[in-house]
Image (cartoon, coloured by chain):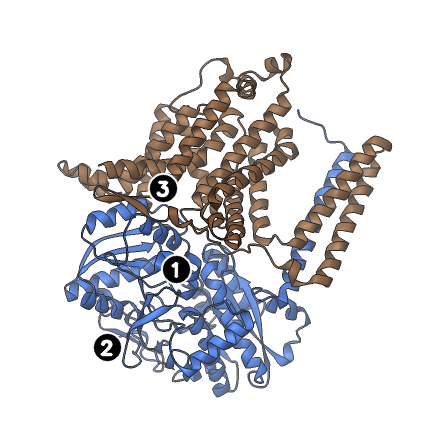
Chain colours: A blue, B brown
Amino acid sequence: MTRRFNRRKFILYGTATLGTSFLLKACANNGTSTTAESPSAVSSTAASPVAAATSGDTIKVGILHSLSGTMAISEKSVVDAENLAIEEINNAGGVLGKKIEAVTEDGASNWDTFKEKATKLIDQDKVAVVFGCWTSASRKNVKPVFESKDHMLWYPVQYEGQECSQNIFYTGAAPNQQIEPSVDWLLKNKGKNFFLVGSDYVFPRTANTIIKAQLAASGGKVVGEDYLPLGNNEVTPIITKIKQALPNGGIIYNTLNGDSNVAFFKQLQGAGLGPDKYPTMSVSIAEEEVKAIGKEYLKGHYAAWNYFMSVDTPANKKFVEAFKKKYGPDRVTNDPMEAAYIMVYLWKQAVEKAKTTDIKQVRVAALGQTFDAPEGKVTMETNHHLSKVVRIGQIGDDGQFKIVYSSDKAVAPIPWNQFVKETKGYGCDWSNPSKGGKYKTT
Amino acid sequence: MLDALFNGISIGAVLLIAALGLAIVFGLMGVINMAHGELMMLGAYTTFVVQNVCKQLGGLWFEGYIFLALIFAFILTAAVGLVLERGVIRFLYGRPLETLLATWGVSLILQQFVRSVNWLLVIGIALFCLFFFGGLWLQRRFVRKSWVVTVLFLLSLGIAIASCKFLAQVYKSALTQPWFGAQNVDVTAPSWLRGGIPFGGFQLPFARLFIIGLTIVCVAGIYIFLQRTSWGLRIRAVTQNRSMSACLGIPTQKIDALTFALGSGLAGVAGCAISLLGSVGPNTGQNYIVDTFMVVVVGGVGNLLGTIIAALAIGTLNYLVGSGTLALLLTPIPPLADLFTFFATTSMAKVMVFALIIAFLQVKPAGIFPQKGRTVDA
């Protein structure tokens, strides 16, 4: 079957492949650059203005999230929230009289890509700040980049703590603002036997270490734990283990991330483990995920966050309204989106206080900033985390959360966990150069 | 123990239905089809589309959409498989390495296609195909000069791009909105597939039972097709001795195309089945491609029975190790129990299963049922 290629054929086939790739590229490009008007297009806001940008009258900021791959289900909406905040700020006159211009990069759910793109945003685009990341794995991977270049990252997602970088501002919850109160609440209301399920990477493993230490200190019991590789859909062995470990029902503490959640809840219901006997507390499932997984699978289960779409504050009404107006009435808002939305505002306030976008001065100015956020008033503490209200919600028929618990006042963040032996007694204070990221408090 | 058996079989059934198409394409035809997973993905996306259409129709349509989806998934992926065979693979028979690379390339193209497909892209490709292949056909009948092909190519390309640009300007987002996008989409099972029947101390999920049933039907169907029909006879004849079959007047090219389309169609059915378990995304296929090859290789290339046994064995083993059942059974023997407890997490179970497979292939390199006779050398 081997054919000899003569020159004519070579040229012919060569042009054919070249041409086809041009065709595909032309059509694909049309696809992205003209979707600017459509609500779900995210990269467009970045793609079109870049070419026309004159660096003088705009401030470039980087947005670095996964727009494809297993994490895209969650991260895309965060980008929407960031773009909403940027648009609102621009419509209100911008920052320091300049418009904000977003440069969006796709981390593609690949932690090495995140690192590359972070370097690109800092070195090539010379952005003033980067808003980005969702998984702790991606944050841990870009952290050295931001530290070595002394740049600034704002990170909008609840995470496992045990970190306090000078170059990162964390606007999601620290463990003591989400995981610990939820475990306390479960111990008080739902029982003492816990089964821990998580994705196999740094956040679930660290979170479970904290939960185990906390349960050991307060009389609860971990009857088993298991981890699924990200993107894995075969959860039957885990469900069997849960049944073996908790024959009469008990609490499932779920730190799965991304698509595995879909498989987990679908098959949990199929196996007959309902929320009445096996209440599941999730820390990565918010309104957006409820919509994607299907509320028929999730009804009655719990989630712990700082913000729910159903929170009743004037700021939240305004936020939800603005979001639906920009992206369509069937869209929902959730905690990471809200954290992403407020972090753009907090950065703007810090820049305005510093009167420059210089990284070092903005970093100092950011400390102590307060903002009347949809979740309630938040304050940027000296450890680069926010004080926030803690809430627990139960998923209802309409896919919204019914808030079953809410802390009386904003809880101060504690990044270094006080239940875990290695970090007990440590604190973080960037307002005082002699203390820094990890100092002994006692 | 029954519980363990059922769960092991249900994991095995997923593996088997995914590997069945590959067992035909790789096992019988010897084509290393790296795009098999992507064909499954196309099947899963077909299910998603059918589901959305049936949701609009509501009522009984939605309850029964899964059967409609199975048929559509089979037809669509079989058609894609046919195009793939006619367009790429038939030039590469007998060259496994090139086939591997080419089909891997196809798998990447399919993944990206699903991410960025929109009306514009489809219109562009359709226009290009229409002009180019139509022109080619005319050229073959009337002109017969080779430079015409180049002109034709550039011309149809130009027309396609120009009309793409024009349409994009006129209709904007209506045409350029991607159909699926890079995000995963979700298939909601009809309500009768969501629960399960209580059985002893545990519950048999309907979705799993459905997949097991579907697998049995597919296996039986394939068996009857291969053993009892004249096309099946021809397929077997061609796989055993291609040149002799050709001498006896069997249209080998047609048989190749048919076999490949059949294998691809089964991949589509498998895609439909897995959409009941998890979410559907452009990368769905990649999660399965390694497992399916593993099943076919362990079973013995070219042997359907081997594939069935291998799928069930790997599924059960994976389950027994991963769920810790094996560790529980071996409690009387402490060192062994410790060993299996160590492997009793989902990630580690996979490690152990792979290690066992490597060990197994050292003993029996050609799988459970090695092929015998002269065909092996051919």
Location of mark 2 (residue): A441
Tag 1: residue type? Lys
The one of A98 and B295 positioned closer to us in this rendering: B295
Task: Look at the image and tell me in which quarter the C terminus of chain A lies.
Answer: bottom left
Q: Which residue is mark 3?
A: B208
Badge 3 amino acid = Arg
Q: Chain of mark 3?
A: B
Mark in the foreground, 2 or 3 = 3
Contact between marks 2 and 1 (CB within 8 A): the answer is: no
Q: Secondary structure at mark 3?
A: helix
- Looking at the image, residue B119 sits to the left or right of residue B25; the answer is right
Proximity of marks 3 and 1: CB atoms separated by less than 8 Å: no
Q: Position of residue A27 (x, y in %)?
A: 68, 54
The nearer-to-camera label among 2 and 1 is: 1
Q: Is residue B318 left or right of residue A293?
A: left
* Circle 2/circle 3 CB separation < 8 Å: no
What is the x, y in percent for residue B262? 54, 31
Residue A295 tag number: 1
Alpha carbons under labels 2 and 3: distance apart: 54 Å
Q: Which mark is residue A438?
A: none
Residue A199 image position (x, y, % from top left): 35, 54
Mark 1, Cα crowd under 10 Å, few <14 / some 14-19 / many 20+, is: some
- Give how far apart the Cα atoms at labels 3 and 1 are: 21 Å
Query: Image quadrant for the N terminus of chain A?
Result: top right
